[in-house]
Image (tube, helix red, strand yellow):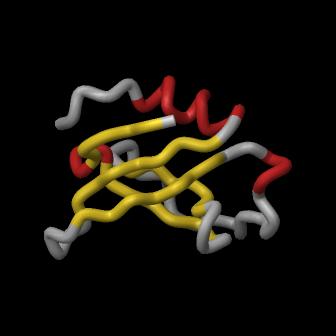
Amino acid sequence: MSNFDFDQLVEDLRKGERTIKFRKKDGTIRFLRATLRDGAIVQPKGTKTTPPNPDVVVVFDVENQGWRSFRKDSVLDIAA
């Protein structure tokens, strides 16, 4: 598991944006400009019927204007 503080990341995302670098399941590296700040999210989050997975972080992709998720153990770097 990566050694990032994901509780702090979620708190930071509620205040602004962060760039998350992670490895996708297919092995490719992805950069995701993410936020959880209410004023930056232009589409509401739907109702989720499955329980949350503690190993996954769900964020709003600022560049593609949609909800995305990544596994905590796939994160390579987090930048402001």
Q: Is residue 63 left or right of residue 55?
A: right
Image position, residue 6 (x, y; %) = 42, 31
Number of numbered discs overlaid on the protein picture: 0
Residue for point 60% across, 28% down = 11
User: Looking at the picture, how far across and down is residue 14, in whole percent?
Assistant: 68, 36
- Residue closest to the eye, 38 or 78: 78
Of residues 47 and 39, which is closer to you in this image?
39
Position above or below: 38 against 42: above
Identify the residue shown where x is 23% and y is 59%: 23
Q: Which residue is depicted at the point 21% across and 35% down?
A: 2
Residue in the foreground of this view, choosing between 6 and 32: 32
Which residue lies most toward the right here? Answer: 39
Q: Quadrant of residue 22?
A: bottom left
Q: Which image quadrant for residue 69?
A: bottom left
From the top left corner, tell me how far across and down residue 4 is, in percent. Answer: 32, 28
Along the horizontal axis of the image, is 47 left or right of 71? right
Q: Is residue 6 left or right of residue 66?
A: left
Question: In the rendered view of the protein, which quadrant contains the N terminus?
Answer: top left
* Residue drawn at x 61%, y 58% as measured from the top left: 60
Compared with 18, 46 (above or below) is below
Name the spot of residue 5 as percent of width and height, x first.
38, 25
**Residue 23 as seen in the image, left or right of residue 80:** left
Seen as rendered, the residue at the extreme front is 80
